[in-house]
Image: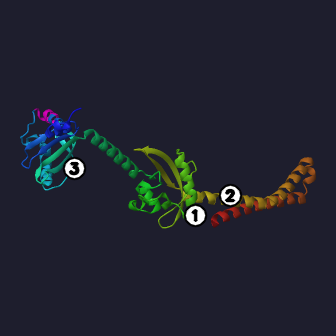
Amino acid sequence: MLNTSEIPLIDTLKAILDSSPENFVLISANHTILLFNRTLQEMISGYFNTDIQIGDDYRNYVLESTQNLYAESFQKALEGEIIIIQDEAVVGNTTVWFEYKMNPVYDVNNQLIGIALYIKNINAQKRAEISRYESEMKFRRIIETAPIAILIVDSQMTITLCNPETEKIFGYNHEEMINQHIDLLIPARFKQNHHQHTEEYLQSPRMYQMGAGRFIPSVTKDGKELIVEVSLNSFIVNGKQLVLAMIQDVTARIQNEIQLKEQVQILEKIAWQHSHEIRRPVANIKGLIDLINMDYEAVQSIPNWSYLEQEVESLDHIIHKIVADTYREFRGK
């Protein structure tokens, strides 16, 4: 078995540093390189086409686009701060994202040995973050400029995003709605029932399209109750379940439909009330017509024709009465 006590401490330290995937260099207060690992050596060789040496001035290996950042961070580290910065550096004809960590290193007597600098290439990670951020911002812009009210809630039914059209319907501004439970928009007497429906939906999410008759009672900031039609769609982002709701205020439409039904019921009532009045003169007219068909000469006397005229006038009066009553009922609403 290897006796580690026989291995010089500096060799042990260098072996540990060389096994690290991060670039490491220890720099003195006057920027002299005291120690570095193999990973940094390979990076310097690749970027500058030269070999780094102990005793070199590290500033000679700092990319031009990051020299000011290096100088400011190095000074802060000399003053005892621990610095962690992400920055995009120009390397040749392209740019690369790096994460820089700087911290002072002291000996057992608390005397400064130098500044430890760790450099990590985070280009792939950062590009992915930027791409996700740009996609999110594009998605937000689409939501915010949509001509219909849209809000997004998480699996706890907490509002995570809403657009100006939603604010117009419910009277809340953006800050008042974000991070609030969806119950904010539900009348108190309907909340328990709404909880049950939302739990069922989250357990078995599916798409509800606008116009499918999914009406939900809602309430505005000033307490006005509305009826809204909601279209739902569930989706997953970064492992989190979200629900997108498209909302349309259909209060006026529902009220008009109710009013129309009431008017139809009134018309049906009017027709029923007058139906028996219509049947009598109509029956008499039919009888006279039958009589005429049987013996035309027998019904040429004045009384018969006068009676026929009276019945026709009676029928005409009733019809006019129906029209007048119907018009009055509509005008009274």
Q: Separation of disc 1 and disc 3 at Cα? A: 53 Å
**The image quarter in which residue 251 lies:** bottom right
Q: Main secondary structure of the magenta part?
A: helix
> Which amino acid does the dot numbered 1 rest on?
Arg
According to the image, label 2 marks what residue? 264
First-in-chain label (1 vs 3): 3
**Residue at 48% in and 57% down:** 182
According to the image, label 1 marks what residue? 189
**The image quarter in which residue 327 lies:** bottom right
- On the rendered structure, is 126 left or right of 254? left
Coordinates of residue 296 in the picture (x, y in percent): 90, 49
Q: Is residue 297 shown to the viewer in this render?
A: yes
- Callout 3: 10 Å neighbours few (<14), some, many (20+)? few
Q: Nearer the viewer, mark 1 or mark 3?
A: 3
According to the image, label 3 marks what residue? 84
Q: Separation of disc 2 and disc 1 at Cα? A: 31 Å
Label 3 element class: strand
Coordinates of residue 204 in the picture (x, y in percent): 54, 45
Question: Which region shows up in magenta?
Answer: 42-49
Residue 45 within the segment the image draws in magenta: yes
Q: Quadrant of the N terminus?
A: top left
> Which amino acid does the dot numbered 3 rest on?
Ile
**Residue at 87% in and 60% down:** 307
